[in-house]
Image (tube, rainbow, N blue to C red):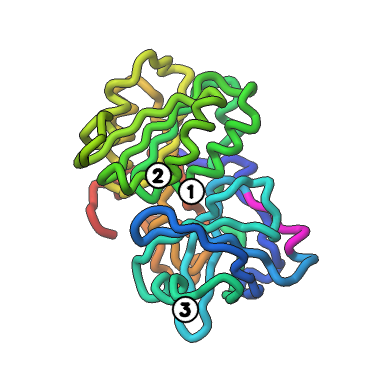
Amino acid sequence: MKTLAQPATARQPATSHNPWLVHRALIEAIRPEVADVATYYLRLADTRLADNYRFLPGQFNMLYVPGCGEVAISMSGPISSTGHELLHTIRLAGRVTDAIIKLREGDSLGLRGPFGTAWPVAECVGRDVIVVAGGLGMAPLRPLLYELMGRRGEFGKVVLLVGARSPDLMLFEEEFARWRALDIQIELTVDRAINGWAGSIGVVPLLLDRLEPLNASQSVVMICGPEVMMHYAALAALRRGIAKESIWISMERNMQCAVGQCGHCQLGPHFVCKQGPVFRFEAMEPYLKYRDF
């Protein structure tokens, strides 16, 4: 049986040697993004830990609200950030996130991490990179985009394909002009238009179908969003001739305890918290046909 190895640089040591140890983090700022979504700027209260904190694009932290529970949230800021400014883009989606959105600047919560595998930036060097984002999937991909822009000369063509339900739900749209100025091609689509929208209408895999020109043999595809979108975006990449082993997806919506003990993140033989959230597409392909996990 073929073993699907993750890249050697995909794992980053946690802030603490004890992955269960929770550290206090202060909410320095809260930036509203779109409806029910905000970015939280956190700072580790322990200065030594903050100085030494590092993460890789695609990794996540566990955020803990005492008396409520904890939730896995991907980092959404540049990897140059230390523990003095950790960005997490959060959508209201359950009990813990409901508790988090009730917190205000100056409040604190618990944080442990970082955990998980990263986007394989090393595999992209010298190749074209196609980044495909659906909805809140833009958040775990933003650190990858910052890394690609910061090392722009090491890569070929860089393309960002973004889909949202409607134009007013397009995450980080205010940054697109700066990204384009750094030689990132950006194509947008929405499920439904509103007045003033002159762009594409339809699902995001259609953008990959229409992408021209495309050097399939030299392309790497990174996808994050709802599972059904990732499934069809990967199929679109395969139709364009991109090799299956060059397609990567993030199963970040399936993360649970971060250390694979609760078992809730298990998909077949894989524990998403420990072996993911970033996987080669072929490792997750059998499970993406299911609408709910």
Residue 54 sits inside the magenta stretch? yes
Residue on which disc 3 sits = 69
- Residue 99, position in %: x, y? 43, 76
Q: Nearer the viewer, residue 106 or 99?
A: 106
**Which circle's residue, 3 or 1, is located before the other in the chain?**
3
The answer to whether the residue labelled 2 contacts the one labelled 1, judged by CB atoms less than 8 Å apart, is yes
Q: Is residue 157 above or below residue 226?
A: above
Spatial CA span between label 3 and label 1: 22 Å
- Residue 281, position in %: x, y? 39, 39
At label 1, the amino acid type is Pro
- Horizontal side, residue 257 vs residue 114: left or right: left
Q: Residue at x 28, y 33 (%)?
A: 205
How crowded pointer 2 is (Cα within 10 Å; few <14, some 14-19, many 20+) is rated as many
At label 2, the amino acid type is Cys
How crowded pointer 1 is (Cα within 10 Å; few <14, some 14-19, many 20+) is rated as many
Q: Residue at x 39, y 61 (%)?
A: 91
Name of the residue lying farthest toward the right: 48
Splitting the image into 4 quarters, where does residue 121 fall? top right
Residue on which disc 2 sits = 224
The answer to whether the residue labelled 3 contacts the one labelled 1, judged by CB atoms less than 8 Å apart, is no
Residue on which disc 1 sits = 140
Q: Which range is magenta?
A: 50-55
At label 3, the amino acid type is Gly
Q: Nearer the viewer, residue 233 or 187?
A: 187
- Residue 21, position in %: x, y? 65, 75
